[in-house]
Image (cartoon, rainbow, N blue to C red):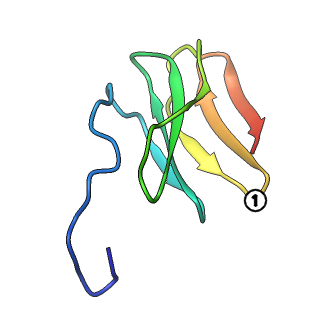
Amino acid sequence: MAKTGGTKADLVTAVSTVGAVAVDDQYLYWTEPTTGLVRRVSKAGGEPPVVAAGEKDPRLIVVGSDAVYWSAAAGIRRLAK
């Protein structure tokens, strides 16, 4: 959507509870605390692949220039992009 407005578009519709969302220049990332997943989707849309699975209660998420970071019950996780 342009900064001055525009038409909204659904990027992902079949999502469990979302814990947090973060973006970079290409993707939207989010955590799903109830499923233990960290996922991403292209800003252009498409099928959202799983970035990480089996996480216990993933919540906060931050995207850096070279990695994705999120909090989970086991601590702070890092995964290279």
Residue at the far front in the pictured view: 46
Residue at the far left in the pictured view: 7
Amino acid type, residue under disc 1 in the picture: Ser
Q: Residue at the spot x=61%, y=48% of the render?
A: 62
Residue 2 placed where, x, y %? 33, 81
Residue 17 placed where, x, y %? 32, 27
Quarter of the figure that contains the N terminus: bottom left
Is 12 left, or right, of 75 in this rendering? left
Q: Residue at the spot x=29%, y=30% of the render?
A: 14
Q: Residue at the spot x=47%, y=37% of the render?
A: 48
Residue 45 placed where, x, y %? 41, 52
* Quarter-of-image position of residue 75: top right
Is 50 left, or right, of 63 in this rendering? left
Q: Is residue 66 above or below residue 48?
A: below
Q: Is residue 55 above or below residue 58?
A: above
Quarter of the figure that contains the C terminus: top right
* SS state under label 1: loop
The one of 2 and 62 positioned closer to us in this rendering: 2
Q: Which residue is mark 1?
A: 65
The one of 14 and 78 positioned closer to us in this rendering: 14
Residue 58 placed where, x, y %? 53, 25
Is 74 left, or right, of 47 in this rendering? right
Rate crowding at label 1 as few (under 14), some (14 to 19) or many (20 or more) other CA atoms within 10 Å: few
Q: Residue at the spot x=39%, y=17% of the render?
A: 34
Q: How many marks?
A: 1
